[in-house]
Image (cartoon, coloured by chain):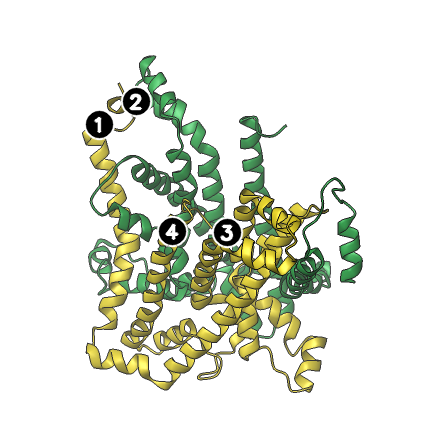
Chain colours: A green, B yellow
């Protein structure tokens, strides 16, 4: 099997150049490991969900609890992604242009949401917004009770998705050609006009990419949300938790169908990100 | 009119923007760190020490390190092999292969666990056969290792592929012309060129592997002392209202995360590379 694959792959041989040794070994290891760990398990899930009849599919996906979970997951993810879009761009701007005491430490900490285990994030945020918590003791008297609410989930997702926008926008601002904005200013544009008409249009692809990546990450997030959300069915139950609940009830088919729908959604988002980057490269003339 | 003409350089605007940034980052990044540390020591040093030295915590630590160790080693070997294949040869479907390698990043952690339950659980043909022969994968250590391998699958490969592509393979070809064999080229030419890149991928993968929660939660079965990793142990303690103990164990993972960030920074400086979104 692998031998056949290697022969097939090799057909696009660049005959003018010699080859380094190791093609067979590298191909064998790569394709075997990829298939066993990723492709076969994912294929089994997709095939399992394909055994569902249309009637069952409709019954599973229109169940009020499932509909509610999708509504909660998608709405909190959209709002969290938008909050990150605004604040992420702002942080990227400040970090690319200005300095302030402690900036280097803050900049390193921006990757914390990638590094901190989600369970730790979950209990830390819940503790912060609890009644006696550092933020909760001020917010709850004001009527802002975040724990076990829609906004609590959103706050957890803002944390989880935070690095994406900052880390995609910051490099663009660093490489930004300052002569462009100087030219705009010399030609009489106000600072606001220069920002909106010259700088922002060039940032749009990075901002969109970062926001979409954050959104995609939020959709699947589980660990940081389950502690703060309270997991009330029809209110604060998210899709990943519902999948686990279905599994624990031995409703494998239900879990699989819901998971496959989520997977489909992620693929669409992945295509959107690739599309944004392709359009951007084409606009800059890097793509035919 | 150099810098004075730059946008947002007015003192007032700059101060407002910096203030918003610092406030936002403090609430979301600094406060969670502090709250973990303070809550962990709330009931004194004694409770803290008891929480991190009880047998269940040590078992969880052991399993976490085993799963993370296996995942990092096997994904590093895979990453080297995939990067060697992709950067040194031209073949059909190369872009598809690169896309497939990134696949686990787009999959929700819960789904990453679910796929192994479907494949090896008691309901599947394969799972049934294995269980009949005494091999337990789901609700046992192998399942936890598999799920951890899956979620950290792309880290080393996606670091090495662009790095090796940008470096080119002229040196490898020169070594080949001078008579070196494949392993000699790999160990003496390629590895020295990419060693910081390998370490960078290893650090990111280890950070994620140690902290993985959703995927491991699905395959673990929550058997105390048997299939608990540190993040799962935290969840159990928290749900039993042992808050100080939960935060005490969380400090172990927090320290690991902060060390990961410092190493990541250092390696970015070594390979002269900007931080970017995963």
The front one of A172 and A237 is A172
What residue is pinned by disc 1? B10
Earlier along the polypeptide chain: callout 4 or callout 2?
4
Distance, label 2 to label 1, CA atoms, is 10 Å
SS of the residue at dot 3? helix
Subunit under mark 2: A
* Crowd class of label 4 (few under 14; some 14 to 19; many from 20; radius 10 Å): many
Q: Are marks 3 and 1 on the same chain?
A: yes
Determine the secondary structure under disc 4.
helix
Tally of marks: 4
Residue at mark 1: chain: B
Residue B218, position as x, y percentages in the image: 53, 71
Label 4 in the same subunit as label 2: yes
Q: Which mark is residue A158?
A: 4
Label 1 – label 4 distance at C-alpha? 30 Å
Dot 3 surroundings within 10 Å: few (below 14), some, or many (20 or more)?
A: some
Q: Chain of mark 3?
A: B
Q: Which residue is mark 3?
A: B193
């Amino acid at each position: 099997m692998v031998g056949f694959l290697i022969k097939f792959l090799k057909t696009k041989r660049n005959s003018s150049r010699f080859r380094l040794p190791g093609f067979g070994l590298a191909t064998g290891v790569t394709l075997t490991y990829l298939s066993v760990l990723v492709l076969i398990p994912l294929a089994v899930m997709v095939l399992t969900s394909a055994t569902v009849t249309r009637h069952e599919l409709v019954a599973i996906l229109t169940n009020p609890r499932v509909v509610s979970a999708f509504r909660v997951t998608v709405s909190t993810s959209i709002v969290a992604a938008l909050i990150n879009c605004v604040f992420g761009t702002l942080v990227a701007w400040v970090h690319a242009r200005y300095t302030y005491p402690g900036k280097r430490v803050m900049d390193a900490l921006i990757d914390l949401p990638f590094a901190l285990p989600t369970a730790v994030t979950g209990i830390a945020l819940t503790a912060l917004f609890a009644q006696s918590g550092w933020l909760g003791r001020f917010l709850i008297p004001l009527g802002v009770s975040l724990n076990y609410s829609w906004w609590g989930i959103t706050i957890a997702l803002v944390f989880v998705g935070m690095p994406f926008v900052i880390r995609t926008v910051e490099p663009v601002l660093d490489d930004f050609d300052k002569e462009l904005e100087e030219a705009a200013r010399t030609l009489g544009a106000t600072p606001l006009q220069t920002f909106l008409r010259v700088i922002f249009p060039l940032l749009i692809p990075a901002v969109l990419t970062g926001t979409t990546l954050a959104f995609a990450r939020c959709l699947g997030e589980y660990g940081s949300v389950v502690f703060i959300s309270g997991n009330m069915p029809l209110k604060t139950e998210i899709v990943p938790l519902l999948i686990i609940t279905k599994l624990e009830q031995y409703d494998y088919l239900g879990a699989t169908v819901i998971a496959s729908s989520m997977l489909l959604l992620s693929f669409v988002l992945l295509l959107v990100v690739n599309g944004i980057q392709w359009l951007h490269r084409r606009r800059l003339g890097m793509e035919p | 009119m150099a810098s004075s003409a730059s946008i947002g350089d007015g003192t007032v605007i700059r101060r407002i923007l910096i203030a918003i940034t610092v406030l936002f980052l403090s609430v979301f990044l600094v406060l969670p760190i502090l709250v973990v540390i303070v809550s962990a020591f709330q009931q004194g040093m004694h409770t803290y020490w008891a929480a991190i030295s009880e047998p269940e915590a040590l078992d969880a630590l052991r399993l976490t390190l085993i799963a993370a160790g296996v995942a990092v080693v096997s994904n590093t070997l895979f990453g080297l092999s995939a990067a060697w294949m992709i950067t040194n040869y031209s073949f059909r479907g190369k872009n598809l292969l690169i896309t497939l390698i990134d696949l686990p990043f787009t999959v929700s952690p819960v789904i990453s666990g679910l796929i192994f339950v479907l494949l090896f659980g008691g309901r599947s043909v394969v799972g049934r056969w294995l269980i009949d022969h005494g091999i337990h994968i789901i609700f046992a250590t192998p399942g936890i290792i598999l799920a951890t391998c899956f979620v950290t699958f792309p880290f080393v490969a996606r670091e090495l592929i662009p790095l090796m592509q940008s470096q080119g393979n002229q040196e490898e070809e020169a070594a080949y012309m001078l008579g070196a064999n494949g392993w000699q080229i790999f160990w003496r030419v390629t590895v020295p060129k990419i060693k910081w890149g390998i370490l960078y991928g290893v650090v990111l993968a280890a950070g994620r592997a140690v902290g993985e929660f959703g995927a491991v939660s699905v395959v673990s079965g929550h058997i105390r002392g048997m299939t608990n990793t540190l993040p799962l142990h935290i969840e159990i303690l928290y749900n039993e209202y042992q808050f100080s103990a939960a935060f005490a164990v969380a400090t172990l993972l927090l320290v690991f995360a902060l060390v990961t960030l410092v190493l990541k920074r250092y390696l970015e400086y070594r390979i002269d590379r900007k931080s970017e979104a995963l």
